[in-house]
Image: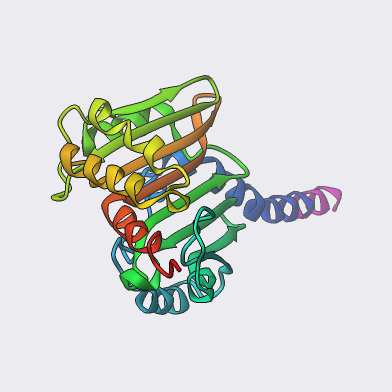
Amino acid sequence: MLKSVFTILVAIILLTCVPYASAEAKRRDIGAMPDAFERLLPSSVFSLGMSAPDLERVIASRYPDWKRSDRQRAMNNRKDVTLTPAARSPYLQTISISFEDKNLGLMREYGFVLTSPLSGSRVYSIVYVVQSHTGQLISVGDWKDELHSRWGREQGGMQSETRARATYFLNAEWQLVENGGEKCAPIYPALVRLDEKPLEAVVDASNLIKTTGCAFSRDNFVGMANGALTKSTFYTVDIQRSVADVAKRVIFGIR
């Protein structure tokens, strides 16, 4: 009798532990999944150049449960000139959506940066963040191998024990710019607070893009622990479209 009771108790304990153990195993093995690197890339349903209405439709149909926040910016953001009220009026600059995936222990977030209505309110930057709360996303070695197999050696970046970055610069045909790390690096400082600068500074940035051919960039910032990625932030940016829009904004509504 006692043996039968003991057997039943053991069976109950094993059955109640299975779901928990399965969930934990699922979380631990995220980094070993065949599509581990794919999870770090933004979905193909989003693309640079898509219109704000198209973006809204995709978010509403594919991501209805994700939390959303918006950010606005002045049409003309310069402080050194006198502007009309229309120039000071805000436009929708950034749409952000986020989701906590409790099944996989992941936080996922998108940021979409739009040009102003002067350029048709088009997406020029897609930022995709994935962070694991329970384990690894992918091993550092596999992450590097996947990057190199897709786009070759990174043209810029860094690595420490806890962080790394891989940067690629591409031309208007989405081909890697030769010596991109050397040619395109000066573009980054030229873009800082560009919409607050005079038109001459914007023209200089535009000419730099044209002469170097650095039209697009891919940039992957990652956080690491114990030889694996725990967070990934992937930027895909249309530099050319961004600067072209700023050139229109900095002269809009000047008195």
Residue 176: tell me if it is visible: no
Q: Is 253 situated above or below 99?
A: below
Q: Find out whether residue 169 is within the magenta segment.
A: no
The residue lying at 56 percent from left, 51 percent from top is: 106
Percent x, y for residue 142? Answer: 36, 31
Percent x, y for residue 74? Answer: 52, 65
Q: Nearer the viewer, residue 226 or 94?
A: 94
The residue lying at 28 percent from left, 36 percent from top is: 168
| Residue range highlighted in magenta | 1-8
Q: Nearer the viewer, residue 83 or 75?
A: 83
Q: Is 240 situated above or below 158?
A: below
Residue 74: tell me if it is visible: yes
Q: Is residue 55 left or right of residue 30?
A: left
The residue lying at 46 percent from left, 39 percent from top is: 31
Q: Residue furthest right?
A: 2
Q: Nearer the viewer, residue 2 or 141?
A: 141
The residue lying at 35 percent from left, 52 percent from top is: 199
Percent x, y for residue 81? Answer: 49, 58
State whether the magenta stretch is mostly helix, strand or loop.
helix
Q: Residue furthest top?
A: 161
Q: Nearer the viewer, residue 17 or 222?
A: 222
Q: Is 70 situated above or below 64?
A: above
